[in-house]
Amino acid sequence: RRHTRCSRDWSSDVCSSDLLAVIPAEAGQQAKQAGLPVGTVLPQVTGEDLTGAKITLPDAAKGRVTLIAFGFSYDSRTPVEAWSEQVRKTFGSTPDFSWYQVPMVGGFGRLAKPFIMGGMRKQTPTPRNTVVVFGGVGPWKERFAVKNDALAYLVLLDRSGVVKWVHAGLFDATTASTLDQQVQALLSPTATP
């Protein structure tokens, strides 16, 4: 007997089977080949942080090296939080560094905005670093070539908002080390834009 359930994906209304998803090794490469090429300015994305303030990225991050962890489903929450926690612990006290978690909510999730925001406020220890975007999910999924919305989609920006590194995946120590090296290089006084 096949068991099915509705996905906790707020950006679509599709039910999926309860099959084990296999994440291809090239998942990180897919994001790099998508519409967020390294060397270009990140397109603007506007949402609301958990204090209620309107935030537009990359504008809010100008002048700081910034990691943005995008999530496209409830299932992406765990990897997004894991990546965010890693950079918060490693670079959180660095004045020239910032980070944001950006849950992208589409479909019928937009109708549940008060419930979604309330739940996130209760569960998120860093309300100013979580920017929730309601609507406009499709173009961002295309930019990242999203094939698996349970992954975190990461973008590292330099101080000018230029994309310097892109990755899609679950948290892993090897990639975290690469990310740390990228951040250190961008924080270096000799880093060029």
Image: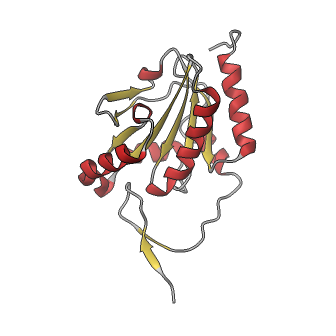
Q: Quadrant of residue 183?
A: top right
At 45% from the left edge and 50% from the top edge, which residue is drawn?
A: 72
Q: Farthest residue toward the bottom?
A: 1
* Whole-percent x, y for residue 184 in the image: 70, 22
- Front residue of this view, candidates 118 and 16: 118
At 36% from the left edge and 41% from the top edge, which residue is drawn?
A: 133
At 52% from the left edge and 74% from the top edge, which residue is drawn?
A: 18
Q: Quadrant of residue 90?
A: top right
Q: Is residue 185 left or right of residue 118?
A: right
Q: Is the residue 180 above or below the residue 69 in the image?
A: above
Q: Is the residue 60 above or below the residue 81 in the image?
A: above
At 42% from the left edge and 22% from the top edge, which residue is drawn?
A: 60
- Front residue of this view, candidates 146 and 175: 175
Which quadrant, please, contains the C terminus? top right
Q: Is residue 150 left or right of residue 139?
A: right
* Whole-percent x, y for residue 66 in the image: 55, 26
Q: Is residue 168 left or right of residue 107?
A: right
* Whole-percent x, y for residue 32 in the image: 63, 40
Q: How is the image coloured?
A: secondary structure
